[in-house]
Image (tube, coloured by chain):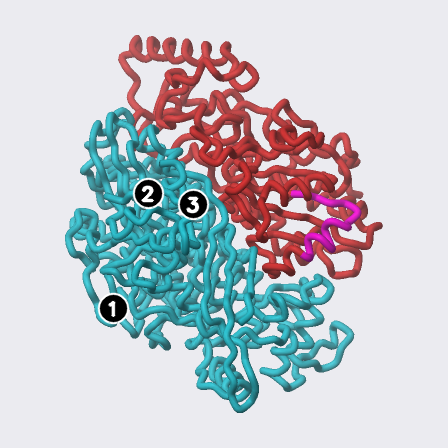
Chain colours: A red, B cyan
C-alpha cells in the first residue's frame, strides 16, 4: 500500500516545497489530474511578455522531472490526448503568430473556465512596448481583468527588475504595483529571481490546477520558496563563514561574503533547489547578487561590494534585512578576524 | 498592392512586427503574389545604456546579460572582454579555456533550440518531415508518426547543454563566472567530468540527429524546387532561393587560442585582423576573405528616428539625437554599415569567414573515438534559409567537440589556483580610474560589440552594437535595405492555407494515420488532424495570405529584438 500524506489545499505548498517538483508531481499526479479532469478540457494559460528579455521563458524550458515535453505530451486530460495545461498564447514558443495568435487568446483563453495568466516582464509607461499593434498596458490590463490566477515570473514582472533600475527610463514596474496603480484589486503570486526557477513555476501551476493558494509573504512570494534566509539557513559555504575563511580573491576559496555576496539580505531557496537540473547556483561559481529581492539591482549594486559597506544598506527595511542580522554579521566578522589573528592566521583551505 | 502585417512575430526573442507590401506577377500558370518591399518594426524599449551609467564597470557583466534572455552569455562575454581591454589585462590560458568551454556549451544550447523550436516547424512542414514538426499529437504522435521526435529530443538536449554551462557559470540563463583577467569559478575534476559526460550526449545528438535532419531537408529540397517551379512557372531551386540577402558577411570571431591571445586582442585595438588563431575567424567576407577593421563601421540614420547630424559616424563617436516625427523615418534602430555596405551577420557569416564557400572539417569525439566529417557546399553565396540552418548544425557539431577537448585539456591545471586569473586582477578592489575598452564576440545571431568608457572608476558611457541591428536595421542613407528587409523581397505569399499547400506539394496519400481513426492520408490532411484541435488550422494566414515562408526567413536570422531595441535608449534620453 502506498503511504503518502493526503493532499489538501492547505498543505499543498508545504509538501511541494519539501518534495521538489519532480517527486511532488510524481506522487500526486493522479490527484492533480483528477482535479482538472472533470472539465474535459485543458487548463488555459496566457503567457504575456512585457518589458522582458525572455530569459524566464528559456528558464522554463530548462524544467526537468517533469520536463516540458512530459508536461505537454504525457500529463493529459482524460483520454483526449490534450495536455493538462497549455498556453493558448505564448510569444516565445507558440506555433501561431500574428492575428491567429491574438485570435486564440481571445477565443480560447478569454472564454476558458479557469484562466491562468503568466506575466514575464513588467509593465512600462505607454509607448514603450507594443504587442500585436496595441500598447502593452492595454493588452496586459485586458488580460488581468479577466484572469482567475495571476502569476508574475522573474524579477521584472515581480518588482520591476533592471528596466525599473535608476533612472527607470521607461517607467517600468512590477505587475502587482501596476494593478494597484490602475485600481484592479487582485493578488499576484510573485515568483522572482532573474531568471525565475522553473521548479517554482511548475509547482505554482500545479497549485493553481487544484485551486490551492500558496501562503505568501509581504512581497507576494510563496513562503515555501522564499521564506528562508540564504546566508543564515541555506548556504553551503556557511561553514566557511563560521570558521572565518573568506574568498577574498577571484581564485580563492571560502565564504563569498567579502566579495560582495548578498546572501545575508536574500530570502530564496536557490542554494537548496539550484538551477539546471539542480546542478549549480550562482554562489558556486561567483556570488549571490540578490535577484530575489524587491529593489534589485539598485539596492545591491555595486555587486562586488560587501553588504555592510553598501551605501544603500540603511535604506533596507527590516523585513528584507534585519539590522540585527547585519549587526551580527559585522560583529561576527570582527570576532572571526580576531580569532584568526590570535591563531596566527589560519591558512586558506587547501585545494581539494 | 496589398499590405500584409504579421505582429507579433512569435518564436523569436522580443517584440517584432513586420509589414510587407506586395506585388503581383503573372506567369503562364496564374497570377501570384510576392513581397515587394518589407519593413521591420522593433516594438519594445527598456534603456540599458542609460541604466548602466554611473555604475561599477563590473556590474555591466551581470546586467548586460539581461539584454537578452535567449542569447545572454554572449553579452557577458563581450562585456567582459571590453573590461579585459579597459583593464589592459589578458586571461591566462586556463581561464581562456574555461571561458571557451562555458560559451561552447552555451552555443550548443542556443543553436539547438533555434533550429528546432524556433525556425524548424515551418521547415518540417515544407519538407514533409515529421520529426521537425512540433509533437502536436502528443506521445502517441511521436511513437506512431514520428511527429515531433527530433523536436522533443531537442528540448532534452538543449537542457543538457545548459547544465554544462551551469556547471561553470552557476546557472543558465545568466551564468556568472568571468572576471577581468580570468574567472571566479574553481577548476575541478567534477566540472570537467560533468561537462564531458553531458557534451558527449550533445555531440551524439548533433551528429546523429541534427545532421540527419539537415540531410532530410536537403533530400526533399529538389522536390520542393520542382513542385513550386511547376506550380508557379518560375525558376525556383528550393530552400536556397528562400531568403537570400547579400554576399557581404561580417564576423568578429569566436573562441580564442589560449596560446595566441595577442592575435585575438589585435582586433580590439583596431588593427585589421582575421583572428585566424581562433576557432571561428573574424572577417568582412565580400566573396573573398577580408580582414575586419573596427574603424570601418558607421551608423546611418536617414530612415531612423534621429536627427540627420547623427548619420555616418563610428559608434564610438556616435551621436543620438532623437527626432520622433522625422519625415520618412520608420525605425528606432540605426542602420550599421561596414564600408558603407549592408552586411549580414550570424551563423552563415561565421562559416564563410572561417571556411569560405565549402565548409569541410573533421571532428573526433574524444570519448568514443567516433569520427565525423562535415561537408557542406554553400548553396547560395548570398546566404539563404537552408544555408543559415546548415551553419548552425555545423557549429553545434564543431563546438560540442571543442567543448570536450578543452575540458579535457583543462585537467593539467586542476591543482593550480594561480592558473585561472591574471595576477594583476587577483583582487576585488581594483577598478581603473579612467580607461576604455572594446569587446568583440559573436552572438549566435551574429557580430556583437560592447564598448565601455570608465571615468572616476564608474561607467561614463556604455554602448552595444548588436547583431539584430545589423540584420534587422532599416534602409541606410544610400537607400540600401537591411539584410532581413532584403531577404524578404520577392518571397511568395500563397493565398492558400498550410494544409492545402502541403497537399499540393505532396499529393500522394501515404501517411498512415490509422492510430488516429483515419486510413492513409495526404501530408496536408495529416497536418490538419494535428492542427485543428489546437485551433491552429489557419496557421500563418494573414489577411488571406500564407506567411509561412516569410516567417521562416525572418526566423532564420534568429532575431533578437531586445538587443536591437536597446539602441533606442540612447536616443530617447539624450
Q: Give the position of the N terminus of chain A as an image quadrant.
A: top right
Determine which quarter of the picture holds residue B6: bottom right
Question: Do circles 2 and 1 both sit on a common chain?
Answer: yes
Q: Mark 2 or mark 1, which is nearer to you?
A: 2
Residue matched to label 2:
B320
The structure residue drawn at horizontal position 44% and vertical position 83%, both measured from the top left corner, is B237
Question: Do circles 2 and 3 both sit on a common chain?
Answer: yes
Residue matched to label 1:
B286
* CA–CA distance in space, label 2 to label 3: 12 Å
Image spot of residue B529 (x, y percent)? 71, 71
The structure residue drawn at horizontal position 40% and vertical position 30%, both measured from the top left corner, is A287
Residue found at the very far right of the displayed protein: A38
Other-residue count near label 2 (Cα within 10 Å), few / some / many at <14 / 14–19 / ≥20: many
Image spot of residue A81 (x, y percent)? 74, 61
Instruction: Name the chain letter of the residue that bears numbered label 2.
Output: B
Image spot of residue B308 (x, y percent)? 31, 49
Q: Give the range drawn in magenta.
A: A103-117
Element under label 3?
Answer: loop
Asked whether the beta carbons under mark 3 and mark 1 sit within 8 Å of each other, the answer is no
Other-residue count near label 1 (Cα within 10 Å), few / some / many at <14 / 14–19 / ≥20: some
Element under label 2?
Answer: loop
* CA–CA distance in space, label 2 to label 1: 30 Å
Residue matched to label 3:
B324
The structure residue drawn at horizontal position 50% and vertical position 10%, both measured from the top left corner, is A324
Residue B510 relative to residue B486: left or right: right
Amino acid at each position: 500500500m502506498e503511504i503518502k500524506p493526503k493532499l489538501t489545499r492547505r498543505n499543498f505548498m508545504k509538501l511541494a516545497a519539501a518534495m521538489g517538483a519532480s517527486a511532488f508531481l510524481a506522487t500526486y499526479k493522479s490527484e492533480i489530474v483528477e482535479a482538472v479532469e472533470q472539465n474535459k478540457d485543458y487548463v488555459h494559460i496566457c503567457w504575456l511578455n512585457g518589458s522582458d528579455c525572455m530569459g524566464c521563458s528559456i528558464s522554463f524550458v530548462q524544467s526537468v522531472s517533469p520536463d516540458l515535453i512530459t508536461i505537454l505530451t504525457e500529463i493529459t486530460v482524460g483520454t483526449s490526448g490534450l495536455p493538462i495545461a497549455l498556453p493558448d498564447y505564448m510569444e516565445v514558443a507558440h506555433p501561431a503568430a500574428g492575428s491567429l495568435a491574438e485570435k486564440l487568446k481571445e477565443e480560447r483563453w478569454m472564454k476558458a473556465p479557469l484562466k491562468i495568466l503568466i506575466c514575464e516582464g513588467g509593465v512600462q509607461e505607454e509607448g514603450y512596448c507594443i504587442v500585436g499593434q496595441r500598447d502593452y498596458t492595454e493588452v496586459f490590463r485586458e488580460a488581468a481583468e479577466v484572469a482567475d490566477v495571476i502569476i508574475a515570473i522573474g524579477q521584472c514582472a515581480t518588482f520591476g527588475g533592471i528596466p525599473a533600475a535608476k533612472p527607470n527610463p521607461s517607467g517600468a514596474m512590477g505587475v502587482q504595483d501596476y494593478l494597484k496603480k490602475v485600481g484592479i484589486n487582485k493578488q499576484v503570486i510573485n515568483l522572482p529571481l532573474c531568471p525565475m526557477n522553473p521548479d517554482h513555476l511548475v509547482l505554482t501551476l500545479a497549485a493553481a490546477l487544484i485551486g490551492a493558494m500558496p501562503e505568501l509573504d509581504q512581497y507576494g512570494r510563496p513562503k515555501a520558496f522564499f521564506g528562508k534566509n540564504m546566508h543564515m539557513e541555506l548556504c553551503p559555504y556557511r561553514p566557511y563563514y563560521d570558521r572565518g575563511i573568506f574568498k577574498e580573491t577571484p581564485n580563492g576559496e571560502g565564504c563569498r561574503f567579502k566579495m560582495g555576496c548578498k546572501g545575508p539580505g536574500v530570502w530564496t531557496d536557490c542554494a537548496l533547489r539550484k538551477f539546471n537540473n539542480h546542478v549549480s547556483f550562482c554562489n558556486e561559481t561567483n556570488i549571490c547578487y540578490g535577484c530575489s529581492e524587491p529593489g534589485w539591482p539598485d539596492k545591491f549594486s555595486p555587486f562586488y561590494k560587501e553588504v555592510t559597506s553598501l551605501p544603500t544598506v540603511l535604506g533596507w527595511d527590516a523585513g528584507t534585512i534585519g539590522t540585527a542580522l547585519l549587526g551580527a554579521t559585522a560583529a561576527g566578522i570582527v570576532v572571526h578576524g580576531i580569532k584568526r589573528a590570535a591563531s596566527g592566521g589560519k591558512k586558506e583551505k587547501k585545494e581539494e | 498592392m496589398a499590405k500584409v502585417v504579421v505582429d507579433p512575430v512569435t518564436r523569436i526573442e522580443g517584440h517584432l512586427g513586420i509589414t510587407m507590401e506586395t506585388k503581383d506577377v503573372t506567369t503562364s500558370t496564374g497570377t501570384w503574389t510576392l513581397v515587394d518591399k518589407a519593413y521591420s518594426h522593433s516594438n519594445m524599449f527598456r534603456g540599458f545604456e542609460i541604466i548602466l551609467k554611473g555604475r561599477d564597470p563590473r556590474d555591466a557583466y551581470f546586467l548586460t546579460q539581461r539584454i537578452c534572455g535567449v542569447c545572454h552569455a554572449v553579452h557577458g562575454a563581450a562585456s567582459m572582454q571590453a573590461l579585459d581591454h579597459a583593464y589592459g589585462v589578458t586571461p591566462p590560458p586556463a581561464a581562456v579555456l574555461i571561458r571557451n568551454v562555458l560559451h561552447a556549451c552555451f552555443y550548443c544550447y542556443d543553436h539547438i533550440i533555434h533550429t528546432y523550436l524556433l525556425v524548424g516547424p515551418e521547415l518540417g512542414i515544407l519538407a514533409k518531415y515529421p520529426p521537425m514538426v512540433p509533437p502536436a499529437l502528443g506521445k502517441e504522435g511521436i511513437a506512431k508518426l514520428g511527429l515531433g521526435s527530433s523536436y522533443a529530443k531537442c528540448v532534452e538536449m538543449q537542457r543538457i547543454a545548459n547544465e554544462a554551462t551551469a556547471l561553470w557559470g552557476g546557472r543558465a540563463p545568466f551564468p556568472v563566472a568571468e572576471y577581468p583577467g580570468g574567472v571566479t569559478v574553481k577548476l575541478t575534476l567534477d566540472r570537467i567530468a560533468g561537462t564531458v559526460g553531458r557534451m558527449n550526449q550533445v555531440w551524439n545528438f548533433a551528429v546523429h540527429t541534427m545532421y540527419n535532419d539537415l540531410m532530410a531537408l536537403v533530400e526533399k529540397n529538389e522536390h520542393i524546387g520542382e513542385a513550386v517551379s511547376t506550380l508557379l512557372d518560375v525558376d525556383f531551386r528550393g530552400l536556397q532561393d528562400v531568403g537570400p540577402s547579400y554576399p557581404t558577411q561580417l564576423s568578429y570571431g569566436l573562441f580564442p587560442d589560449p596560446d595566441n591571445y595577442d592575435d585575438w586582442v589585435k582586433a580590439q585595438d583596431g588593427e585589421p585582423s582575421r583572428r585566424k588563431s581562433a576557432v571561428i575567424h573574424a572577417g568582412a567576407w565580400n566573396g573573398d576573405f577580408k580582414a575586419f577593421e573596427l574603424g570601418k563601421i558607421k551608423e546611418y540614420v536617414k530612415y531612423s528616428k534621429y536627427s540627420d547630424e547623427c548619420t555616418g559616424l563610428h559608434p564610438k563617436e556616435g551621436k543620438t539625437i532623437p527626432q520622433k516625427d522625422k519625415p520618412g523615418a520608420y525605425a528606432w534602430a540605426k542602420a550599421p554599415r561596414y564600408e558603407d555596405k549592408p552586411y549580414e551577420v550570424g551563423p552563415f557569416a561565421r562559416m564563410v569567414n572561417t571556411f569560405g564557400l565549402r565548409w569541410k572539417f573533421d571532428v573526433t569525439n574524444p570519448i568514443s573515438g567516433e569520427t565525423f566529417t562535415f561537408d557542406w557546399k554553400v548553396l547560395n553565396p548570398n546566404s539563404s534559409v537552408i544555408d543559415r540552418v546548415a551553419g548552425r548544425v555545423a557549429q553545434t557539431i564543431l563546438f560540442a567537440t571543442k567543448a570536450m577537448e578543452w575540458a579535457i585539456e583543462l585537467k593539467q591545471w586542476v591543482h593550480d589556483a594561480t592558473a585561472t586569473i591574471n595576477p594583476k586582477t587577483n583582487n576585488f578592489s581594483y577598478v581603473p580610474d579612467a580607461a576604455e575598452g572594446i569587446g568583440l564576440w559573436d552572438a549566435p545571431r551574429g557580430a556583437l560589440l560592447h564598448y565601455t568608457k570608465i571615468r572616476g572608476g564608474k561607467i561614463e558611457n556604455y554602448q552595444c552594437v548588436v547583431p539584430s541591428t545589423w540584420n534587422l536595421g532599416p534602409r541606410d542613407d544610400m537607400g540600401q535595405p537591411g539584410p532581413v528587409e532584403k531577404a524578404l523581397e520577392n518571397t511568395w505569399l500563397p493565398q492558400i492555407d498550410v494544409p492545402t499547400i502541403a497537399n499540393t506539394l505532396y499529393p500522394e496519400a501515404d501517411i498512415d494515420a490509422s492510430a488516429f481513426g483515419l486510413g492513409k492520408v495526404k501530408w496536408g490532411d495529416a497536418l490538419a488532424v494535428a492542427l485543428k484541435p489546437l485551433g491552429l488550422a489557419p496557421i500563418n494566414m494573414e489577411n488571406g495570405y500564407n506567411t509561412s515562408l516569410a516567417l521562416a526567413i525572418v526566423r532564420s536570422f534568429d532575431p533578437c529584438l531586445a538587443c536591437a531595441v536597446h539602441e533606442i535608449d540612447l536616443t530617447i534620453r539624450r
